[in-house]
Image (cartoon, rainbow, N blue to C red):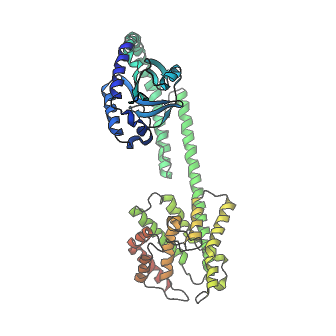
Amino acid sequence: MVNDQSAFATEIAEYAASFIDPRRVDDYLTDGETAEGYLEVKESLRRIWEVSASIEYLYAYRIAEDGCHVVFDIDTPDTPGGEPGELVPFDESFAEYIPALLAGERIEPLISDDTFGWLLTVYTPIYDAEGACQCYMAVDVSMPKLMVNEVVFITQLLSLFLGFYALILSVSIAMAREYLIKPINAMASAAGEFAYNSEAARGDSVERIRSMDIHTGDEIENLYRALTKTVEDTAAYISEVSEKNRAINHLQNGLILVMADLVESRDKCTGDHIKNTAAYVQIIIDQMRREGIYSEAITDQFAEDVVNSAPLHDIGKIQVPDAILNKPGKLTAEEFADMKEHTTHGGSIIADAIEQLGAGDSGYLREAKNLALCHHEKWDGSGYPNGLKGEEIPLSARIMAVADVFDALVSKRSYKEGMPFEKAMSIIREGSGSHFDPLVVQAFVDAEDQVRKVSAEKKAHTH
């Protein structure tokens, strides 16, 4: 069988080699599939491999001192072929044949059991017009397939024993299924389907495990008792932790508003600015999610972090002198420069908080810092403090920029009247692509009805 298959593999290798132009081997190695005619040759080799059931692998290598360089390598269902030019190290079984292969000589079929399994391998050299070997066409035949008759014989022999063994197993499995598998599967299913997302769901899950009431009088019952106690304790602990988290979140949000109100109380011009901007930010984010804008970035956590930290965007104004903060007239260039520093002051304040709290991975504080530092950056790079441009500006700050400017336009200040809603919306549209991220403006404009409602409620509250 080995001799017959060696002759057959040699014929296949020689036939496959006829499709490869030795003059183009260098191009195949360097350019791969983009080389002229490469894909056509590879398709021909693939068809040869498909119609030769006993062939395991079909490939062409250039043999060099450093190993085998892939020219063609046909994919198989279990093993993807190498890429053109890829280096494949020599297997130990080929050590004594390397000198002959480097010299471009023919070698006898050989049997090896190395990297790619137990194989009968035939190498056929491909010579150019000058007689130089440009590469080898190789065919691997699976030795296990050649031994199929032996496997069949062993299978018949073992079947005599397996028949009797199966009879014993069938009785054992029936008993195991009733007294072992069924209770274990029931426990595994109940544990796997345990719901942690709400108090009611946790209670239902615990009750489902209790209702199994397994009584086997052995280790299975002990396991069931331990599992029941564990899930009861776990559910109680999760409920306790959830309650503490709710209290912490409530405290955190309260502290945010206290800090923001502290800043706002110094600025007699802003009124309900922090509440209004937070409402506009929520509207923009909700609309962006409905329209699929920046869908990968705007997760549930991102939305929660940005909305909750929005009141802190002007926290840096706490370091701006009152004389500048509440000046009724236009600021001088020097005063405006001092006012602009509130962005860097705010970023520093939040950065200090992150460092003091050791909360470097906190998404909430990270977004608070982004908002405080970058909400006056502009899409075209003309903003401050760092002149960031386009998507260099954090997404949360790009959202806040629209909310902040719009609220400033429609709000009445000591030095100006509030602008009509339509005029303010027109200015926001005009700033798309220059001052603002166009996609954020799109979401804001598309949610005009909700924006108008918040703006109207603000005016009613002011009056």
Seen from this angle, which residue lies furthest right? 356
Identify which residue is drawn at 48% across, 24% down.
101
Q: How many marks?
A: 0
**Visible residue check, residue 262:** no
Percent of width and height locating residue 159: 38, 12
- Residue 20 lies in what quarter of the image? top left
Q: Residue 312, position in %: x, y? A: 59, 70
Task: Please state which of residues 27 and 117 is positioned toward the viewer in this rendering.
Answer: 27
Q: Is residue 378 visible?
A: yes
Q: Is residue 357 left or right of residue 85?
A: right
- The quadrant holding residue 377 is bottom right
Quadrant location of residue 327?
bottom right
Q: Residue at x 46, y 66 (%)?
A: 285
Question: Quick one: quadrant of the N terminus?
Answer: top left
- As drawn, 367 above or below 419: above
- Please give the name of the residue rendered at 57% of the width and 59% of the height, measured from the top-left corner: 363
